[in-house]
């Protein structure tokens, strides 16, 4: 792979002028303040100064910039809303790089009500895409915390997940077509939105989740769904984590697969939230050791009809099942939201967790996934080890997808800096891999997990990835130093 | 790419002995009768004699065979049930090849009721996989005509579709993990079945649909679904094909996304079926010009409950909607199956089409897809041109997926051999591509569509595919001459 190194001053100016010739002078930023902003992401942990920032306004401008970078030996760092958690969207120190900020490519090109698809450019903010669908009476279900500032291109490049992957799938599964610029500057135009297309290798899914290392996604077609007419939200206390899949499967059967949210809310996490935010309380009078936040939703008109007692039919479906599960000893207690306020309160609880953990002191965050049937075993082993080593785990997770955000904090009375984090981390990943888990469920690799990737990813797959990278990007210009650890 | 050519007699014997050393003598076939069977597929159109047939019994045997072939410069042709329609699973004439018949790797390794997944080997017959899921009270929804003899490995390698892709997705979308042998003999073991795993490039989806040109899938994990408790099947006559998406979308909304089948059954196709099979009749007393076969199904217990008039609640949902759609002039007439016999009759009609077309004389078959909103435009244009040039189109299709099997036959009184098929075919593909369609929706490329692939696939994607092929299979041993046209 070609070496990319910092050019001299005159090279730098020449390169900026080349970029200005493509996107116009106003769309090339070189002042130190701008370079600092675009050189840093949301976490603040990853920061470096690029040669310049270019803001292309079209796919052909992206292609021209890619060719210019290849010619000049300058690394290309595609960038969306800088909300990534792994440092995948910012430049590397010591590397001559161009940040390719996609924010000007922010058009919703079409919303096709008949086909229930939407074509959006990479720089569209996720929430704007959701709004566009809503204006057409449809739902774009991809959603997560950063929705107000993250961009579609970044969501695809990290194959973002979030709250309702369980029902609608990840960014990859929602995407039925892309437009992209490959490292040689050629343009892939596959925006037809076809549900069936077996004409060769799956280039779309290869680019999704590649974190900009194989090309730049410039636009995409997404599936849209009908807006729910009825929704039921509840907080459950269940007898043990090992019975979570029983609850999930029976709830799916009872509602015809309408479970949108199935979140793990164990007591330590809810305790911390309640301590941090005095206006938030445990949803059940007897706090749940193993809590679940669930939500089911359907577009069926009959689910939104009232039952004789005035409640929703869908609520009735859920209540019937909860009664059965209580009879069986699986569910200990439950609270079904009976008003929009109660629903908002439950969501407020869920959405306060990260802030509460952060306010609580230093923490080590993870983004892991496990086979559903192995989660209880994993959590029990890690909770035991944590207690032994002086950690207090604060866990939440998209349990329906097997995705845990298992965070380690210092146990009461322990100082973070005294704790054996490396030992804990090693055991955590050993245990995770032994149970068939993944060390990155929905955040990606970026810079932050390159060491885990090197140590834990199956060698055969790593070798295949490197071969693909070399084949599509022989000059190594596309977001080098991200996702793939060096040989 | 290395040249693969026919070796001499002694080489051949030496190579067979090497294979026998790996899989045992009983599992290497070299007699002419066997070579003829394994050298021909279901269509009978593609036939060639391999050097030998090897029947591996394990993944490590597959890996050893791959290495042996690479060493000997012998092409590897992975083979399932030989039910492919494009010649992707049989050897090429003039090429020294080993057929790698996967039929001995036919274990259902596990059915995980908690996670609702199933791990099966590549040689499992599709129907056996369906049966295994059913024995655990679950459904494996992948299904199509060849289910009684096609194998899982072939279904994945062609990313097979079928009847209920609309609801459950193609083979790729149902698959959540694979085990595979890469062209260098290394083994990818990614059978964890994780719903979220963002640790690098999507190797799974790259191998699925690659028709054995990038490696050999030896096992896979599939999602399973609850068995339906209620099912409603109906035949509709609608006012025009252009209104099909209105019917589909309103039916989805009304049933909460429970539409499993949405098949296009236009009058010419149904007429031919009725002429060919005198025991089959038009389902409606006034034959539908634009007919639709629909089926909705849910696992909801309340959908299987009786309404006061004794009918199913789910039927009631569908009937309510049909009444509205008739009021709106979208649906002209409808027949909702009221008994298992009526349902069977409707399915018998749908499943008789291919046999009826075949009995009707020579035909040119297609497997195309279009954006839903463009299908009516395409069909109208092609029907007009067909009439002009002397063809009678006999079309059926998985309309919900935008997938048509638009078959051309000779119009009454016209001789097939006199018709300008090349002109018709050229116009059909021109029109298809102009409307954003695909020339292979669910059957793949194999040998039969290499010319269309060369002429119609976007050059940027074709170049990327070739680069990936060269990178992963530098010796060109994996099913050469399939899927990718030569440079």
Image (spheres, coloured by chain):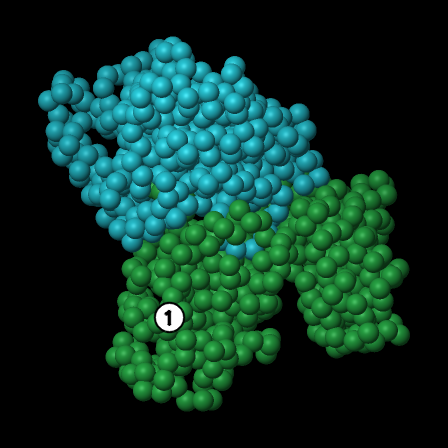
Chain colours: A cyan, B green
Q: Position of residue B262 (x, y in %)?
A: 69, 53
Left/right placement of residue B218 relative to residue B373 reads left
Q: Residue at x 35, y 39 (%)?
A: A476
Indicate whether A62 appears above or below B256. above
Quadrant for the N terminus of chain A, please: top left
Foreground residue, B256 or B211? B211
- Element under disc 1: loop
Q: Position of residue A146 (x, y in %)?
A: 44, 23
Res A452 → quadrant: top left
Left/right placement of residue B443 relative to residue B221 reads right
Residue furthest out toward the left: A418
Foreground residue, A464 or A428? A464
Q: Residue at x 76, y 67 (%)?
A: B421
Q: Is residue A136 visible?
A: yes
Q: Residue at x 41, y 79 (%)?
A: B6
Indicate whether B392 appears above or below A417. below
Foreground residue, B163 or B228? B163
The disc numbered 1 marks a residue on which chain?
B
Mark 1 lies on residue: B105
Image label count: 1
Q: Residue at x 71, y 53 (%)?
A: B430
Left/right placement of residue A218 relative to residue A271 reads right
Indicate whether B440 appears above or below A484. below
Foreground residue, A419 or B484? B484
Q: Is residue A403 visible?
A: no
Left/right placement of residue B1 relative to residue B440 reads left
Quadrant for the C terminus of chain A, please: top left
Q: Position of residue A30 (x, y in %)?
A: 41, 15
Q: Position of residue B11 (x, y in %)?
A: 32, 83
């Amino acid at each position: 792979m070609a070496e990319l190194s910092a050019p001299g001053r005159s090279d730098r100016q020449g390169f900026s002028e080349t970029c200005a010739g493509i996107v116009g002078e106003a769309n090339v930023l070189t002042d130190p303040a701008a370079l600092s902003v675009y050189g840093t992401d949301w976490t603040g942990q990853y920061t470096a100064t690029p040669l310049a920032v270019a803001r292309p306004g079209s796919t052909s401008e992206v292609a021209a910039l890619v060719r210019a970078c290849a010619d000049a030996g300058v690394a290309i760092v595609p960038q969306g809303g800088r909300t990534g958690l792994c440092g995948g969207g910012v430049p590397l120190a010591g590397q001559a790089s161009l940040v390719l900020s996609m924010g000007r490519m922010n058009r919703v090109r079409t919303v096709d009500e008949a086909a229930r698809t939407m074509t959006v450019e990479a720089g569209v903010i996720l929430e704007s895409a959701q709004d566009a669908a809503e204006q057409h009476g449809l739902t774009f279900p991809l959603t997560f915390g950063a929705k107000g500032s993250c961009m579609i291109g970044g969501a695809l490049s990290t194959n973002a997940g979030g709250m309702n992957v369980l029902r609608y799938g990840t960014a990859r599964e929602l995407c039925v077509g892309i437009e992209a610029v490959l490292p040689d500057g050629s343009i892939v135009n596959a925006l037809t939105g076809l549900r069936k297309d077996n004409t060769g290798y799956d280039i779309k899914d290869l680019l999704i989740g590649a974190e900009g290392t194989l090309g730049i996604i410039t636009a995409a077609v997404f599936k849209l769904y009908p807006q729910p007419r009825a929704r039921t939200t509840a907080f459950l206390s269940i007898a043990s984590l090992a019975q979570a899949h029983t609850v999930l499967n029976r709830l799916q059967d009872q509602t015809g697969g309408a479970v949108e949210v199935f979140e793990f809310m164990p007591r330590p996490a809810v305790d911390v939230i309640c301590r941090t935010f005095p206006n938030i309380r445990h949803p059940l009078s007897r706090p749940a050791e193993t809590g679940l936040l669930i939500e089911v939703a359907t577009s069926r008109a009959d689910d939104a009809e009232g039952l004789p007692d005035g409640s929703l039919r869908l609520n009735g479906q859920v209540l019937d099942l909860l009664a059965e599960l209580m009879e069986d000893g699986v569910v200990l207690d439950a609270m079904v939201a009976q008003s929009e306020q109660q629903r908002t309160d439950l969501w407020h609880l869920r959405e306060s967790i990260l802030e509460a953990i952060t306010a609580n002191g230093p923490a080590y965050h993870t983004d892991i996934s496990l086979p559903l049937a192995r989660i209880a075993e994993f959590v029990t082993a890690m909770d035991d080890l944590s207690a032994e080593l002086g950690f207090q785990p604060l866990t939440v997770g998209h349990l329906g997808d097997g995705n845990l955000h298992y965070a380690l904090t210092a146990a009461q009375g322990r100082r973070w800096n005294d704790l054996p984090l490396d030992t804990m981390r090693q055991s955590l990943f050993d245990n995770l891999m032994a149970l068939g888990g993944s060390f990155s469920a929905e955040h990606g690799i970026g810079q932050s997990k390159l060491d885990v990737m090197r140590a834990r990813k199956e060698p055969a797959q790593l070798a295949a990835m490197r071969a693909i990278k070399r084949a599509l990007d022989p000059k190594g210009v596309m977001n080098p130093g991200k996702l793939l650890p060096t040989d």
